[in-house]
Image: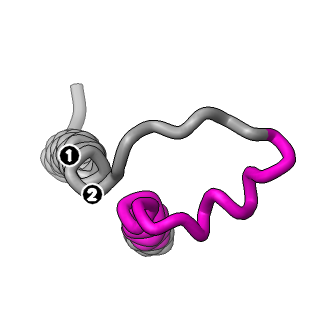
Amino acid sequence: MHDTTKRVEIVERRVRYHKTRKSIHRLMVLCGALCVSLLFVLHQTSGPAYPVIYGMYGTILLHENVGGYVLVAVVCFTAAVVVTLLYSEYQRRR
């Protein structure tokens, strides 16, 4: 049998664990929603599909209808940086 302080510590640890799990689940849902919204933006802003020409891959990024790809890349990079910073802050506090 545990004394009162040990029981309080166990309960606080469980509460902390459940809060952490909730925050991780919320971040997962947020990332999923972000991916779906980025796919929607990509679909709306991209033009017709082009065949892959291996020698000219770099120049296809200069075409007029690829602004959506650049937008998705920038937003994904920004989201990855934010998630990394949030996770490192969480680890630091832990």
Q: Position of residue 51 (x, y in %)?
A: 60, 33
Q: Between marks 1 and 2, how big is the CA–CA gap?
A: 9 Å
Decide: is 22 above or below 78. above
Residue to which mark 2 is pinned: 45
The tag earlier along the polypeptide, 1 or 2, is 1
- Residue nearest the viewer, comparing 92 with 40: 40
The amino acid sitting under disc 1 is Phe
Residue at image point 34% right, 52% down: 46
Q: Is residue 47 left or right of residue 87?
A: left
Question: Of the numbered discs in the image, which one, if any, rests on residue 40?
Answer: 1
At label 2, which amino acid type do we have?
Thr
Q: Which residues are magenta?
A: 54-81
Residue 93 vs residue 34: left or right? right
Q: How many marks?
A: 2
Q: What residue sits 31% from the left and 51% below the top?
A: 42
Q: How many other residues sit within 10 Å of disc 2, few (<14), some (14-19) or many (≥20)? A: some
Please give left or right for residue 89 compared with residue 32 in the image: right
